[in-house]
Image: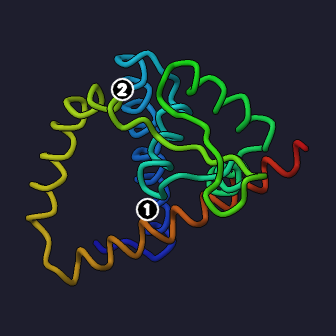
């Protein structure tokens, strides 16, 4: 018996919830092994993927309130993970960048997840992988907008 569209959408939403929960728990476990909070590790991910950011850009990228980002940068700087420096194009701005030499501790925690994901991708055709990439990317955009909306409502 085939599922109705509504049932399939419900399955997608439930699978998304499951993935979200497991992802949060994985990041909490990684954070715990290196003495950081999950938000700190995800901020490192933003800086890793996007490069050095001003605090304002980091607030926009993360959807977090500027005051929260300032406190977050203070904590990461205190732990030696990031450094603040002058912006190369505008000396009035501060640029936050990773201290890459401090990131070596993160590598081993990812090996099992990444190898499992590569193996899983091998089961899908290129066309199927493209649909998965589009779905995940658009889901991330919706989630980001929702985070920003929640942040704006609080401030």
Q: Is residue 60 left or right of residue 12?
A: right
Query: In the figure, 136 relative to 58: above or below?
Result: below
Between 111 and 13, the one lying in front of the other is 111
**Is disc 1 placed on a helix, strand or loop?**
helix
**Is disc 2 placed on a helix, strand or loop?**
helix
Residue 56 locus on image (x, y percent): 73, 52
Residue 14 locus on image (x, y percent): 46, 52
**Closer to the N terminus: mark 1 or mark 2?**
1
Query: In the figure, 58 relative to 113: above or below?
Result: below
Residue 111 locus on image (x, y percent): 16, 37
Q: Which of the numbered marks, if any, corresponds to residue 30?
A: 2
Mark 1 = which residue?
Answer: 12
Q: Residue at x 13, y 78 (%)?
A: 125
Q: Residue at x 61, y 58 (%)?
A: 88
Q: Residue at x 52, y 24 (%)?
A: 37
Residue 69 locus on image (x, y percent): 70, 38
Mark 1 residue crowding within 10 angstroms, few (<14) / some (14–19) / many (20+): few
* Quadrant of the snapshot with the N terminus: bottom left
Between 110 and 127, the one lying in front of the other is 110
Question: Residue 135 is drawn in which quadrant?
Answer: bottom left
């Amino acid at each position: 018996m085939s599922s109705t569209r509504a049932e399939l959408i419900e399955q997608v939403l439930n699978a998304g919830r499951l993935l979200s929960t497991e992802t949060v728990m994985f990041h909490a476990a990684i954070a715990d092994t290196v003495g950081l909070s999950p938000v700190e590790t995800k901020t490192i991910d933003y800086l890793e993927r996007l490069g050095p950011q001003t605090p304002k850009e980091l607030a926009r990228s993360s959807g977090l309130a500027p005051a929260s980002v300032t406190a977050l940068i203070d904590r990461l700087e205190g732990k030696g993970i990031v450094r603040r420096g002058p912006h190369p194009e505008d000396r009035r701005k501060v640029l936050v960048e990773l201290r890459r030499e401090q990131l070596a501790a993160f590598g081993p925690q990812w090996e099992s997840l990444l190898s499992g994901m590569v193996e899983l991708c091998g089961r899908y055709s290129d066309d199927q992988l493209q649909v998965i990439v589009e779905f995940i990317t658009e889901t991330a955009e919706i989630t980001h907008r929702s985070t920003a909306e929640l942040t704006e409502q609080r401030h």
